[in-house]
Image: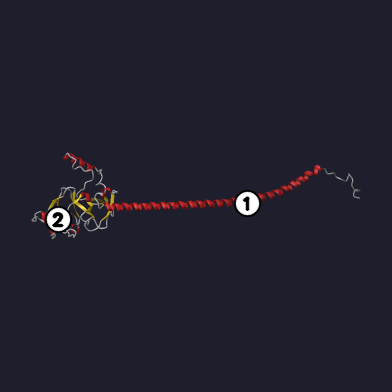
Amino acid sequence: VAHANFSPQNTKRVSPSSSRPERDSVRAETMSWSSIAVHGLDLTWRRWCTARTHRHGLRGKRKVVVAVCRRQSNASSASQRRRRTRVAVSSVGMLLGINVFGALVHYDDELFRYYPLPFAIDACQGPSMMPGFRSGEVYLRDTLSHRLIWLNMEHWKRNIQSMIDDRSLDNVSLTRGWRRGDVVTIYNPFTRSIVTKRIVGLEGDVVLVYGKDAAALKERGDSNCGVPRDTRFETPYCQRVRERQAEDREIEDVTIAVPKDHVWVEGDNPLHSTDSRHYGPLPVSALRGKLLWRLSSCNEVE
């Protein structure tokens, strides 16, 4: 029965070559859409995984780099702090050493020649230099110009004129000479102290042993011409000089000539000053410098 109705006229022969492209195209079309979807999902997944891995890797690298940089910065900052500490400690130690050395050499004439600084800072104490110099004020002192060659035109003009007049080098000085009126810091070998006084007389000058204000103070009724009593000097120098000279001379007229390489110093406040009236002329080597500037008000010392 199955083969009864089968006839070549009713049957359409299908060629293998004609049906294969259609099947291939359907399969290809079906495979292309599925592969695209799978490939897209796979590509998305791969990209996401790659991005995630790369991102975590960068984060790890950043953490490592940041940690290393922090460690290096901490190490560098610590080394800088240690370096600054060493520099500060060495600077303070050097300044303290210079100050201690400077304070010690002020008490020795020979060592003071090796004082390392060209200046010093002094604080005035006591009433001996009042009213011009008050206790507690700070001053800048020149400690170099009288020890080294002084490059000053006026100074060298005086030297040349002295050479022409005297025809000798006896009065030629390479260093800055001391002048009357200079306010100087002195090491007093009699009291073993550092004091500030004013130069009244230089080598060869004739000075009043009771002071330049002796006559004025005597007129005020002071029988001792303003020379204050100091227990360290039972007999002041001025009294000893008067005893050697004629006692009939007026007390304010007793004079001496300042010896060679010596100076006569007095305080601006004679009623409260222990100076050359008590211990006599001081050697030039005892002078430690000239006061230049008053640092508290930034004006020049007169």
81 sits to left or right of 121: right
Q: Quadrant of residue 130?
A: bottom left
Residue 249 place in picture, x, y as percent: 9, 55
Q: Quadrant of residue 194?
A: bottom left
Q: Which mark is residue 238?
A: 2
Residue 197 place in picture, x, y as percent: 21, 54
Residue 272 place in picture, x, y as percent: 19, 59
Residue 64 place in picture, x, y as percent: 53, 52
In the image, 209 versus 22, the foreground residue is: 209
**Residue visible at 46% across and 52% down in the picture:** 75
**Residue visible at 56% across and 52% down in the picture:** 60
Q: Secondary structure at mark 2?
A: helix
The kind of residue on which mark 2 rests is: Cys
Which of the two discs, 2 and 1, labels the residue nearer the N terminus? Answer: 1
166 sits to left or right of 44: left
Image: 294 above or below 165: below
Q: Which mark is residue 49?
A: 1
Q: Secondary structure at mark 1?
A: helix
The kind of residue on which mark 1 rests is: Cys
